[in-house]
Amino acid sequence: EVIDYVIEKYGADKVAQIITFGTMKAKAVVRDVGRALDMSYAEADAIAKMIPFDLKMTLDTALRTSPELQSAYGGDERVRKLIDTAKALEGMPRHASTHAAGVVISKRSIDEYVPLYNSDKGVSTQFPMGTIEELGLLKMDFLGLRNLTVIRDALAFIERNHGVSIDFSRLRQDDPKVFELIASGNTQGVFQLESSGMIRFMKELRPDCFEDIVAGIALYRPGPMASIPDYLRNKKNLKKVQYVHESLVPILSVTYGCIVYQEQVMQIVRDLAGYTYGRSDLVRRAMSKKKMDVMLREEEKFIFGETDADGDVTVEGCVRRGVPETAAREIFRQMISFAEYAFNKSHAAAYAVLTYRTAYLKVYYPVEFMAALMTSMMGDAAQVAKYVRNCAEMGVEVLPPDINESEKKFSVKDGKIRFGLLGVKNVGEGAIDAILRARAEKGAPTSIFEFIDNININEINKKAVESLILAGALDCLHPNRAAHIAVYEKLMESAQASARKTVEGQLSLFGLNGEEMRGAAASNNLPLVEDFSKQERMAREKEMLGIYLTGHPLSDRREIIDKVSDITTEEIVAFKENPNVRDNMKTLMVAIINRKKTQITKSGKIMAFLDIEDLYGTVEAIVFPSVYERCAQAIFEDAVVVLRGKLSFKDEETPKIIAEKITPVDVAEEFYRRKERETAAKTAV
């Protein structure tokens, strides 16, 4: 919306997004070169996995630090050729994409300044961000934050349900309950504080003021993370905070003696060395662009100052201002070490405002906030499932979709959240509009006969009605879903036939048919068929909603899960934030197989790709032919199994489990029961 706004305001020829180039990083370049050298995927992948996982890892560093890679490089000519070729290509551009937020706005048509590129997201520049800035063009970052919509929707719910209009601009940011929520770790949906690593950090930090939130957001990044232990230690022991020079106290006391922000560096060079505002900003730019050569040239000027050709002092320097040379050098050294990872406080503070506001809403209006949050995530079943679990933890009930109660999106009524009809698979906006319109005009139906009679049959199809039944949206009319499934097709065919026969000026046969339907509804004339089993209901519900809502197939298996599972899907997905979860790590998990896809390999054998789910989320498992052959009888959709395997983490890919053994959960339960009986018998003897 913001990009469309600036295009309309300044003209389509004066606005463009910015190109970025994905580069060949260590692991990826090994796999790419392996493919080009006709090595098998398994061979190249095995070599790539010898490279330690690190965002800044290079092949030279890997050869120095990985004994496994050193051995392969020295002992195999093919591996040596692969690595040497990959080293020549490492760091080169691999593909072009569009900067996530960068937009250029120019005075005249952009093609007068830079060549353009027609990307999948629209027109972008052919020059990357650095070149754009060097040319003097204005680069702006437009962050399309979903959280702004969440806040807006939550405020609308609150006003509707409670008659309270919240104006955040008039609200102080010092509420102890908000800080308590953040320190508790219940921050699902709170902006910037959702990851497991950030939750751990905030539990340790226990913020008690807005400044702590700002600092936390700035610190929890790959570089500044190194300062986190000092920050935490100093916050808890204010009297032990040490400063290189007393002049740093007013600048660094707010962050307990640690340099956290670019603005602090700007203030240090201004207050201690007499830099101008403009010159201090040049130092900030050098820091943010990691231009260490520029920073190093500034050291002598920072310490001793600078004079112009006429001998006039342009920069006083620390020594002239009473800061000893040794202290000045140490201060500059600290700034240099920070320069590579500098973060600007203005950005962190703006983020922290959203953090505080989302946390405030979760503290005081959790039902409205979670409804708005889940609405924003419609279409992402894994995220919705995560928030439904969080609602259960907070005692907030999430009700299934209901044709008489649900709106298009998630809604709130009587302190409960109602699932939105848009979240039901195969049900489009047109069908939902027809349902809501019929409900408003003719009232809530009391049977499936009346439901189909009331609705404009031309605006809803059989697939949509079937999906609504299986999702539980017609349970309000009758709880037997199998009975509804047995009659809905004939009812719709009858209604469609009547609609076709109805002509202007003629008595509506559909109307007559409707009377018959209402008569049938009054006698509850549904076929006497046995309802679906609990497992079947849950499986179909999951298929239609993307999540298990009214129950979970693993809920009754908690005892075996506690005994067997040593990891959760949530921990696997968030592996980058958990040092205890590693590539190739052996693991054991109780899970349900949601989806199974088989594939014939080149050798004519069958392998499978599974979507497996535990109580916390979903992850993919790969079953190679040798394992599939041994365990095929246990591998089918909706089966609850114990899966033994090893974790597989690859660059730019979602985490996976490589299965080594898959066993029906009943077998595992019997095994543990037998062990318990044997232990009890020995104890008795």
Image (cartoon, rainbow, N blue to C red):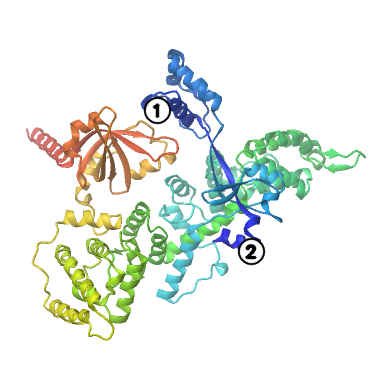
124 to the left or right of 680: right
Position of residue 308 measured from the top left corner of the image (x, y, whole percent)? 88, 40
* Residue 170 horizontal/vertical position (percent): 57, 69
x and y percent of residue 436 in the render?
33, 74
State whether residue 566 appears in this view.
yes
Q: Determine the residue positioned at 11% across, 36% down.
A: 674
Closer mark to the observer between disc 1 and disc 2: 2
Q: Which kind of residue does numbered mark 2 sit on?
A: Lys
Crowdedness of circle 1 by 10 Å Cα count: few (<14), some, many (20+)? some
Residue 194 marker: none
Residue matched to label 2:
9
Is residue 176 in sight in this rendering? no
Quarter that holds the C terminus: top left
Label 2 sits on a secondary structure element that is helix
Instruction: Assess disc 2: are there few (<14), some (14-19) or many (≥20) residues with their C-alpha within 10 Å of its C-alpha.
Output: few
Q: How many marks?
A: 2
Dot 1 falls on a residue whose secondary structure is helix
Q: Quadrant of residue 611?
A: top left
User: Which quadrant does the N terminus fall into?
Assistant: bottom right
Q: Is residue 254 left or right of residue 531?
A: right
**Residue farthest left in this picture:** 685
Instruction: Name the residue type under label 1.
Output: Asp
Q: Residue at x 47, y 60 (%)?
A: 358
Q: Nearer the viewer, residue 616 or 434?
A: 434
Please give the name of the residue rendered at 71% of the width and 55% of the height, measured from the top-left corner.
108
Residue indicated by mark 1:
45
Q: Residue at x 56, y 48 (%)?
A: 118
| Placement of 600 over or under 239, stated as above or below | above
Sequence-first disc among 1 and 2: 2
The residues tagged by marks 1 and 2 sit, at their Cα atoms, a distance apart of 50 Å
